[in-house]
Each structure stands twice: as structure tokens, then as C-alpha cells.
Image (cartoon, rainbow, N blue to C red):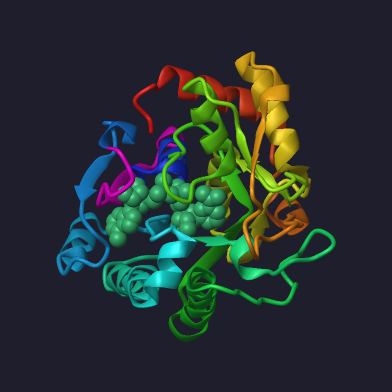
Amino acid sequence: MRVLVTGGAGFIGSHAADRCLSDGHQVAVLDNLRSGSRSQVDPRAEFLELDTRDSRLESAIAGFRPEAILHFAAQIDVRVSCKDPIFDAEENILATLRLVEAGLANGLKHFVFASSGGAIYGEAAGPQSEGHPEVPINPYGVAKLAVDKYLHAYAVQRGLASCSLRFSNVYGPRQGAKGEAGVIAVFCKRLRDGLAPMVNGDGLQTRDFVYAPDLAEAASLVLAQRATGVYNLSTGRETSILDVARALCLHAGVDPAGIQHAPAIAGEQRRSVLDASKAGRKLGWKPATPLSAGMGGTYRWFEQNREVQ
Ligand SMILES: NC(=O)c1ccc[n+]([C@@H]2O[C@H](COP(=O)([O-])OP(=O)(O)OC[C@H]3O[C@@H](n4cnc5c(N)ncnc54)[C@H](O)[C@@H]3O)[C@@H](O)[C@H]2O)c1
């Protein structure tokens, strides 16, 4: 199949693009390299250096004629979305619609979207399933939810098979440690640079950490089955930030007693955990990588890639 992976020079998208190549698909990666890196694009993939908002998008899509699009390219910073909701909507909503329209004009059959459970469901006592109330509290979450709904409308109005994958907190090799990055990447970088992890508040806030290569496996299943609808992708396990910091100290050979604490961030979500049992039942997907093994792999990657900031 011809598969276009937008954001395929970035963290999660590059794992998905690699997986598509090993599944035997013909792959093109479209990325503006804002946070992604050309070195993360396998030379077997065609590379299109382009912004999804660029007027040349349609001709790029017409040139490759993807049968499926995996859409990872996005403005990913919640704080940027709050400061500049118009920029966020242009990139995360309007550019996505242009991508779908260009795809449909050129034979697109299946559109798969990187959505976000954490940004769409609010705080809850237990794992949140796909039926949980959708209550985004920032423009980034509103945009993710809007695209999920647009894709449903495209399925009804234009017969496009589409799938929204709502990730929990993703971690793994190739994750950037700048800006509003994943906490595991931030801690790995600090430890690699000889600094102890800096935990916000008491560190007892919890997250559900899923390993990026396991998401690539989910994307592979979704493409093979031409799956449609909304799926949470997560482990269903809550882990506190303090436990993550302690485990990473051990991977780095550093005494966890040195962990530092910064003031708590006002309004930070206390608990976040998603129920991915639908993906297990319908796609046959299971997050295969235990957190400890994934954190070890991530820390080693940061050690081997000292240029990553
Ligand atoms: N990392 C997480 O925990 C997480 C959780 C839920 C959802 N997501 C979603 O997964 C997707 C991938 O996120 P990531 O963590 O891999 O981030 P990332 O920044 O590593 O990847 C995004 C990629 O898209 C590219 N890009 C950004 N804007 C673009 C544009 N306008 N045109 C072309 N390319 C553009 C960047 O250069 C980068 O390579 C995003 O849609 C994000 O919202 C991520």
C-alpha cells in the first residue's frame, strides 16, 4: 500500500513510518522538520519537506497518491495553543482538513489520526474509556476532538474510512526533551547530563505511559484491518512521576536520594489513565513493552545520542 506519514521525521511518526516500511508498504514522509529530524527518516522512504499549511500540499499529495495517511504532524504544545489558539487551529484543524480533502481528490481510502486521550478526557478516578465525557480544557484538546468529529463526518458524508487513535502519555527513543516534552525524555536528558530529575510538586501525580514502538504496532494493525472509529491506546496502568524518576535514576546508576522537587504546577492534572480494552478486543493490540524495559531503552538512547537537547 502507498502510505503517507505526516510528521514522520518526528518522535512517534518515525516509529510508525519504520513499521510501515517493515510491513512492506511504500512510504512517503511529509514533515516541515520543525521538531523532527531528517536523520530519523529511513532512506527507503520518500521524503517531502513541506508544511501541512503550504499551498503546495495538494500537488505533493497528487504526486504520491496515498491510499492511506497516518497523520502525526501537529502543533503539539498545549501552552502554545493557549497563547495562540488561531495558529493552533490553523495547523491542527484546518491543515488537517486540507490534507483529507487533497487525499480524497487523489484516491485516499483510509485516514488515521494521532489524537489524544489526555487532552480530551478530564480528570477521573479510574481508567477512562472511549465513552467517557469529552471535556477538553485547552485549544490543543479542542482541536484534537474537533478532528475526531470531522473524521466521523467524513465517514458519513464521503465514505472515508477513518480512525482516531487517542494516545495516553507516549515515551520512547527519539522523543525530544525541549519545550513541553514528555517527562521521561526530560528526566533522561537531565540524568544523561549529570543532573538529578526535577519533580514538580510531590510527584504523586500519575500518568499512563505507553511506549512509541507499541503505538507503531497499533498503527500497523489499524492499516492492515482498515479499522475505523475511535481507539484509546495506552497501558491502563497509572505510574507516579516520582516512581518514574526513581526508576530512571536506577537505570542511570544515580542515587534516587538526589531527586529534587520544584513547586507544583497550578492546575496540573493529578491523575490520568486510559482504558484501551477496546483496542485489545477489536484490533488485537496489546502494549507489549513493560515500563521498566521501555525506560531502560529510552535512557540508553539518550546516552547514545548526546546531541539531543
Ligand atoms: N507525545 C505524546 O505523548 C502524544 C500524546 C498524544 C498525542 N500525540 C500526538 O502525536 C503526534 C506526534 O507527536 P510527537 O510527540 O511525535 O511530536 P513530534 O514533535 O516529535 O512530531 C511532530 C512532527 O511533525 C512535524 N510537524 C509539525 N508541524 C508540522 C506541519 N505543520 N507540517 C509538517 N510537519 C509538521 C514536526 O517537525 C515533527 O517531525 C502529534 O499529533 C501529537 O499531538 C502525542
Which of 83/297 is in front?
83
- Residue 63 located within the stretch drawn in magenta: no
Tell me how many marks there are.
0
94 up-or-down from 196: above or below: below
Q: Residue furthest top?
A: 253
For residue 215, which quarter of the picture?
top right
The residue sitting at 53% across, 62% down in the picture is 115
Q: Residue furthest front?
A: 263
146 up-or-down from 222: above or below: below
52 up-or-down from 255: above or below: below
Q: List x then y, in percent, for residue 141.
A: 54, 70
Q: Is residue 37 left or right of residue 82?
A: left
The residue sitting at 46% across, 86% down in the picture is 157
Q: Residue furthest right?
A: 125
In the rendered image, is residue 224 in sight?
no
Q: List x then y, in percent, for residue 94.
A: 34, 76
The residue sitting at 57% across, 61% down in the picture is 116
Which of 277/239 is in front?
239
Q: List x then y, in percent, for residue 181.
A: 49, 46
Which of 56/167 is in front?
167
Q: List x then y, in percent, for residue 197.
A: 60, 32
For residue 267, which quarter of the picture?
bottom right
Magenta stretch bounds: 21-37
Q: Is residue 63 left or right of residue 42?
A: left
In the rendered image, is residue 46 in sight?
yes
User: Which quadrant: the C terminus?
Assistant: top left
- Residue 22 located within the stretch drawn in magenta: yes
